[in-house]
Amino acid sequence: DAGVIQSPRHEVTEMGQEVTLRCKPISGHDYLFWYRQTMMRGLELLIYFNNNVPIDDSGMPEDRFSAKMPNASFSTLKIQPSEPRDSAVYFCASSLTDVTNGFSNTEAFFGQGTRLTVV
Amino acid sequence: KQEVTQIPAALSVPEGENLVLNCSFTDSAIYNLQWFRQDPGKGLTSLLLIQSSQREQTSGRLNASLDKSSGRSTLYIAASQPGDSATYLCAVTSLSGGSYIPTFGRGTSLIVHP
C-alpha cells in the first residue's frame, strides 16, 4: 500500500474562496482522522470517522469547516469561505482497530499533509 | 479529556550525546503510545509504538519506555547524530466515546550539532 495519500500538497488561495482537501486512507483501515497543525496550537484533532461515519466533529473550529467520507477510500475536508487564520498544515491519518487479546493495536499512519495558505 | 505534555519543548546537543525526551499524559487508561518524528515541512513518521501491556520498545538507537501507572513515557536516543535533528511528537491513544483517538503533545524540537 502507498500509505495515506493527501492532495494537494500545497494550496494557496485568496480569502473567501472555497478550499477542498482530499485524503485517501490506507486500504482496509476503519478509522480516518483529520488534524490541523499550527505553531500556536500544535496538532489538533478536527474530526474523525469510523467506518465512513463521522463520530466526533467537536474539534471543527467553525461552521465554515465540513468533512465528508463518501466511501472507505476517500475523504474531503472543505473550508468555505476560507480566511487567513485557516492557514496551517492539515493532516489526514488512518488506523485499523485490531483488538487482540483485549488490547487494541491502533497504530496511526499519517499522510504528508496539505500546507494551506490563505492570503 | 486526555492531555499530553512533552518536555523539553526544545533541545540542542552536540553530536554523540545520549538524550532523553519526555512525554506525560493525564489519563492512564491508554491503549498505546506512539513516538513520531517530523522533519521541517514534512509529515509524521512513526518511530515506535508501545502497546499498553508493554514496558518498552527498541529500534536501532531509539528506545521508548512506558510507565502507564505514572502517565509517563521517555524516548531515549543513543549516540545522537545531526541527522536526528527534527521534532519528536508523542501521541497517546485512548478510548473516547467508544473510539480510539490519538492525542498529541506539542513536541520536542531537537537540534544535534556537529
Image (tube, coloured by chain):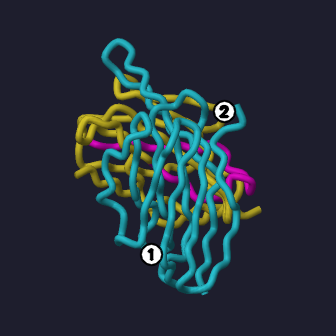
Residue B20 visible: yes
In 3D space, how far apart are the residues under numbered discs 2 and 1 (Cα atoms)?
33 Å
Between B82 and B31, the one lying in front of the other is B31
Asked if residue B89 is among those painted magenta in the image, a careful observer would answer yes
Between A65 and B16, the one lying in front of the other is A65
Disc 2 on helix, strand or loop? loop
Badge 1: how crowded within 10 Å, few (<14), some, or many (20+)? few
In the visual, does B14 lie left or right of A109? right
In the visual, does A46 lie left or right of B61? left
Residue B97 against residue B42 in the figure, above or below: above
In the visual, does B67 lie left or right of A44? left
Magenta residues, as a range?
Answer: B70-90
Badge 2: how crowded within 10 Å, few (<14), some, or many (20+)? few
Which chain: cyan? A
Which residue is the site of mark 2? Answer: B60
Q: For the point 41% across and 61% down, which residue is it? A: A44
Which residue is the site of mark 1? Answer: A40
Asked if residue A35 is among those painted magenta in the image, a careful observer would answer no
Q: For the point 46% across and 48% down, which residue is it? A: A33
Q: x and y percent of residue A23 in the render?
A: 59, 50
Q: For the point 38% across and 35% down, which residue is it? A: B66
Q: Colour of chain B?
A: yellow
Between A111 and B89, the one lying in front of the other is A111
Q: Amino acid at mark 2?
A: Gly
